[in-house]
Amino acid sequence: MDSRIFHFYNTLTRQKEIFKPLVKDQAGIYTCGPTVYHYAHIGNMRTYIAEDTLVRALKYFGYKVTRVMNITDVGHLTSDSDTGEDKMELGARREGKSAWDIAKFYTEAFFKDYKALNCVMPDVTCPATEYIKEMVALVSALEAKGLTYSIGDGVYFDTARLPDYGKLAGKGHVEGIREGARVEVNAEKRNPADFALWKISAPGEQRQMEWASPWGKGFPGWHLECSAMAMKHLGETIDIHCGGEDHVAVHHTNEIAQSEGATGKPFSNYWMHIRFLVTGDAGKMSKSAGEFLTLPVLQEKGYDPLAYRHFCFCAHYRKQLEFSWEAIDASQKSLGGLRAIVTRLKEEAAAQAPAPRKDLEYLPDGRPTFWKHFEEALADDLNMSLVLAGIWGALHSNYSAAEKLAFVREADSVLGLDLDRAPAQEAMPAGVAELIAERETARKAKDFKRSDELRMALLEKGVSIEDTPKGTKWKLVRG
């Protein structure tokens, strides 16, 4: 494969394609952001890491990238079938705060995690509540084309009017929706697949988030916001639209319908979807399940957030990734190993001249051949596990320290693992030093019963110890 040509899998065409942007050497990307009614879990963050890697890779290959991300702070109901409570109102009731305060708090929490994972901030961040005017205008445009109808609870898109409705998800899925098999049936809807564009507040209901509109006071449908904001900032046709695999069947399918219904143009030329992070029983991590793992929890257990980023590179973004403590331990160790090698390379490079060796192969531009392997893996649908393997191979090659150091620093502009950072030393938990000292005293006094009791007390604090000729060594035990 020519490493100058970037390929990735297009959900719309169901094949790997060469990326051909609308404007030469530029890429407009829209990525679905969080619904800020609760903390993001690490499964959510896998999607953002993959999208960040896409942006970094395109920049590496010379594209000028404009990335837009929405913040859903209104309109996302607890059911994709336009029923249930708005998640923002749900969060407000759960915590006894206003929906606006909930949105602010969880938006800040999300971006704290996002930055800790070394994800580059989007060029444009769009809270849905700031784009109501654009959403109302989009519904009006669809209404003028005869693609909508009104029922008791709002304005709906008439999917029967769009011949290719559901092309992203596939014919079989759409037939299932139209038979009412995959969504709750609203008896007033003309077709089970029809979806809300504008929801009208119920009589006597006092919502925290509602706006006046030509159809009555209410709030936008969840799908509507992404179309309105993507087209405002990137144009009626965009290059790439990204999101989690759960968005294919309903959310992104409906985005296409309303966008293309309004403009008569393709909405997005390429669609990229990231598979779920799953738990040991093969179930996806979900907030609705009640228990979910967040990045701060990993940090509290002593993990570098970038160890999780590294972990996400261990499986292709189009394959499910199974979380385990053993796997995250391995990533933490691997990341530390990479940083240790880079630290040593910096010392070696400072002490030797970077002269090319005649017994090694070089590319026509003078770079070691491992650059070609890195770029081919990256350009082949972001094959990050192969990229990581190539980096290990390059670092253990016979090329000079300076050549390897230059390579790993450039490669890390895509990986985002801070490989130039010195390996972190684990902090000793509070009270551990005193217990270790007390145990040493007990051992010297041959009080082995007390020594064993103190070993167990240390384990309860998550610390394992090992007695060696050079003294007692300790390490954190996670799980």
Image: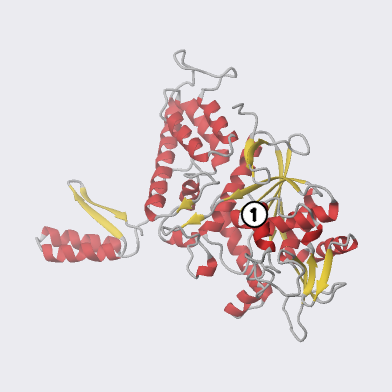
Which of the two residues, 199 or 456, is positioned nearer the viewer here?
199
Quadrant (top left, top right, bottom left, bottom right) of the N terminus: top right
The colouring scheme, among rainbow, by chain, secondary structure or one colour, is secondary structure
Which of the two residues, 86 or 310, is positioned nearer the viewer here?
86
Q: Residue at x 54, y 41 (%)?
A: 415
Residue lying furthest bottom in this view?
Answer: 204
Q: Is residue 60 above or below residue 89?
A: above
Q: Is residue 180 above or below residue 204?
A: above
Q: Amino acid at mark 1?
A: Gly
In the rendered structure, the answer to whether residue 72 lies left or right of residue 148 reads left
Q: Secondary structure at mark 1?
A: helix
Residue 150: % across, % down:
82, 72
Residue 137: % across, % down:
86, 62
Which of the two residues, 276 or 424, is positioned nearer the viewer here?
276
The answer to whether residue 169 of the structure is visible from this angle is: no
Which of the two residues, 201 or 329, is positioned nearer the viewer here?
201
Residue 448: % across, % down:
11, 62
- Quadrant of the rendered structure where residue 66 is? top right
Q: Residue at x 45, y 27 (%)?
A: 401
In the rendered structure, the answer to whether residue 455 lies left or right of residue 477 reads left
In the rendered structure, the answer to whether residue 283 lies left or right of residue 216 reads left
Q: How many marks?
A: 1
In the rendered structure, the answer to whether residue 402 lies left or right of residue 29 reads left
Q: Residue at x 74, y 57 (%)?
A: 255
Q: Residue at x 64, y 56 (%)?
A: 173
Q: Which residue is mark 1?
A: 172
Residue lying furthest left in this view?
Answer: 446
- Label 1 neighbour load within 10 Å: few <14, some 14-19, many 20+: few
